[in-house]
Image: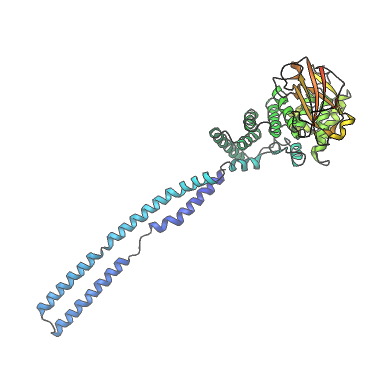
Amino acid sequence: MTSLWIVVVLLLLATLLCLIPPLLRRALPVALAADENLRAFYRAQREQLQRDLRAGSVSPEAALRAEEELQRELLQDLAARQPRVGLVGGQRAGLAAACLLTVLIPVAAVLLYGKLGNPRAVADMTHTRTAPAHANIAGNGVGNGASNGADNGAATDAAGPASDGADMAVAINALAQRLRASPDDADGWYTLARSYETLGRYTDAVAAYRQVLRLVPGQPVVLADLADALLSANQGKPDTDAIAAVAQALVADPDQPKALALAGMIALRRGDAAEALVHWERLQTLLPADSEAARQIQSNIAQARAMSAGAPAAKPGSGMGASISNTNGAADGVSSKDAPPPAGPSPARISGTASIADALRGQVQPGDTVFILARPVAGSRMPLAITQWRVSDLPRAFVLDDSNAMSPQAKLSGASRVQVEIRISRSGKAAAQPGDLSGVLSDVDIRARDLELVADTVVR
């Protein structure tokens, strides 16, 4: 950033050096040369008069009168020209123009840049140059988003040069000040949040991500990034806010890479290796088979399978928790020293198998959206837990617990009996539409296991 302003100042100085000196330069003494020519003309006339006097063509009295007349005419002609007044006036005008340009050109350049330029580009450029892989995840789908998501967070410990770090801090502070004055810039808040993460300011990053979600609610990439920042701020320990953010991200986009990685890590920390496998196996299908991320997720899958079989957990060398989920603490969520031993079912955990009735399978497409959710038996209809798949995933085992909550204030553990539903939607919307398929299990205990949830009804 400093080098940019140095270049700007040098360009302004070069411009002023081209414009100012000609205005301050003295005018050529053209008027003085003209005066000298006038005097020479009168001298020539006087000499001619003297020759006439010597030749006797004129009398001495007439010659004297003629010479006096010549001197008077010379003085009148010189006074009429007044060359010095014109010269001083021109110098003053040039000096005034030089002073005016010296002030106006820099001011106009700054105003024009503020109007047509992009002041935030300095922060973005510095951020792009110094930010590690953790700040580069896009997560915009299966292709580029999946690969970027899989590589997120691997290198946040890499530090740039001290001068670059100082420039970046200045740029970030400038961006933060601009956003306080213009708080409705979602792109600006997102850039600020990612920049804060790069500096390790995770609490500030959380606040910035919340501003993004205030302006553009429900964005799965931002929700996953928010969960990542929450985990990093909490030394990798999942809290209700992080769990809810992951669940909401997966509801919005079941294939969001970072959300899948975090969901698996959270499940493994809870001792639920089966659910961790569900998320990580889905993530594995989104990654290029020969990528480093795919090899890392395979290592974590092997660990989860070992835990599911009752074997002690082996520490994954560079597991997916270190390359996707976060950069400071969340990676430890899958390490053997921090992972809790296999435990029994959580106090609120519903599991079973979801499928489609054979008679209705022909009415759906592989890409149709599948919602599995649990609602209170009475009262509010807001889901207490929800997960989202594709028809191509069915039949499949499912798990609903507090990690699938949409809100920290409405969780499965807050109820005693629930209604478990499956809905298959062509539109991808959670609200039921005519033509959707559905199935309901009424009055289910929040610790129920081995349920058979079948989509066997057409919504009318």
- Of residues 92 and 155, the one drawn nearer to the viewer in this rendering: 92
- Of residues 186 and 91, the one drawn nearer to the viewer in this rendering: 186
- Of residues 159 and 231, the one drawn nearer to the viewer in this rendering: 231
Q: Is residue 141 above or below residue 312?
A: below
Q: Which residue lies at the image location 65% right of the left edge and 42% below the top edge? A: 128
Judge whether residue 315 can be spotted in this image.
Answer: no
| Coordinates of residue 149 in the picture (x, y in percent) | 74, 37
| Coordinates of residue 274 in the picture (x, y in percent) | 84, 26
| Coordinates of residue 144 in the picture (x, y in percent) | 75, 42
Q: Which residue lies at the image location 38% right of the left edge and 56% below the top edge? A: 24
Judge whether residue 20 can be spotted in this image.
Answer: yes
Image quarter in which the N terminus is found: top right
Q: Is residue 101 above or below residue 184?
A: below
Horizontal side, residue 237 vs residue 441: left or right: left
Horizontal side, residue 363 vs residue 410: left or right: right
Image quarter in which the C terminus is found: top right
Which image quadrant for residue 414? top right
View extreme (top): residue = 416
Q: For the image shown, how many numbered marks are present on the structure?
A: 0
Which image quadrant for residue 130? top right
Q: Which residue lies at the image location 15% right of the left edge and 83% below the top edge? A: 54
View extreme (front): residue = 460
Horizontal side, residue 422 vs residue 48: left or right: right
Which image quadrant for residue 332? top right
| Coordinates of residue 147 in the picture (x, y in percent) | 76, 40
Q: How is the image coloured?
A: rainbow
